[in-house]
């Protein structure tokens, strides 16, 4: 770069020089095709808008997230109270079902509020896989599992013995 060109230090549109030869990070110059040197904001995830209008109260705007959190909290309450013999299994299945519900809501609703964390595809895969694994493990927990998968038992016996 030549002295005085827009990208050179000390030029009207370029970064200014600091003591000891360091260059400050300023925002991108208008019309420049270079990316900014400092990120000032992050993009909202696809579908991350309010689930209800701005005139609705805050809980109504975030009802998908509250529904998923409420289902997971109910599952944790069932596990924590231990009120019946299979409460651990049922409560854990409720936690997994909450994640599966989050995946379904993320797929069918155009806006889910703060339930949107990443892209729609990534959220659906993450919620779906984690929810499925939690439900599957809850069904297979010992003693007296509700679901038996023989090849998994064989793998367990091979690794333990």
Image (cartoon, grey):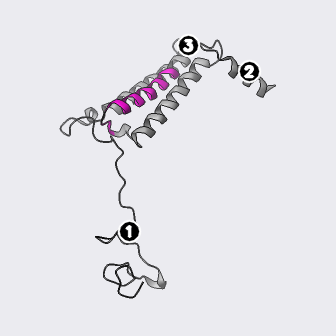
Local packing at callout 1 (Cα closer than 10 Å; few below 14, some 14-19, many 20+) is few
Q: The N terminus is located in which quarter?
A: bottom left
Q: Identify the residue position indicated by label 3 in the image.
A: 86
Q: Position of residue 134 (x, y in %)?
A: 54, 26
The answer to whether residue 142 is left or right of residue 85 is right
Disc with the residue nearer the chain's start (1 vs 3):
1
CA gap between label 2 and label 3 equals 25 Å
Q: CA distance from mark 1 to mark 3?
A: 60 Å
Mark 2 to mark 1: distance in Å?
57 Å
Q: Measured along the vertical axis of the image, is residue 40 above or below residue 133?
A: below
The foreground one among 83 and 155 is 155
Please, which residue is most extreme toward the left here? 55
Residue shown at 26%/37% (left/top)?
58
Q: Position of residue 97 (x, y in %)?
A: 46, 23
Q: Residues within 10 Å of mark 3 (few under 14, many from 20)?
A: few
* SS class, disc 2: helix
Measuring 24% from the left and 35% from the top, which residue is drawn there?
52
Q: Nearer the viewer, mark 2 or mark 1?
A: 1
Could you say whether the residue bearing mark 1 is in a helix, strand or loop? loop
Q: Camera-side residue: 30 or 160? A: 30
Q: Which residue is mark 2?
A: 154
Which segment did they paint magenta?
A: 92-113
Secondary structure mostly seen in magenta is helix
> In the rendered image of this protein, does residue 154 appear above or below residue 57?
above
Q: Quadrant of residue 112?
A: top left
Image check: 48 left or right of 118?
left
Closer to the chain start, of discs 2 and 3, is 3
Instruction: Give the class, few, some or many, for how many residues have Cα within 10 Å of label 2's Cα (few <14, many ≥20).
Output: few
Q: Is residue 95 highlighted in magenta?
A: yes
């Amino acid at each position: 770069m030549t002295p005085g060109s827009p990208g050179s230090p000390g030029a009207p549109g370029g970064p200014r020089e600091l003591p000891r030869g360091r260059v400050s990070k300023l925002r991108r110059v208008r019309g420049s095709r270079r990316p900014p040197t400092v990120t000032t904001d992050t993009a909202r995830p696809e579908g991350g808008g309010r689930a209800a209008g701005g005139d609705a109260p805050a809980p109504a705007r975030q009802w998908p997230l509250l529904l998923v959190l409420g289902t997971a909290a109910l599952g944790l309450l069932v596990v924590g109270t231990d009120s019946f013999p299979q409460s651990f299994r049922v409560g854990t299945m409720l936690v997994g079902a909450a994640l599966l519900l989050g995946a379904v809501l993320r797929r069918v609703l155009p806006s889910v509020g703060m339930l949107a964390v990443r892209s729609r595809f990534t959220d659906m895969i993450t919620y779906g896989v984690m929810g499925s694994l939690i439900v599957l493990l809850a069904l297979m927990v010992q003693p007296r599992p509700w679901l038996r998968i023989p090849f998994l038992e064989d793998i367990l016996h091979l690794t333990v013995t």
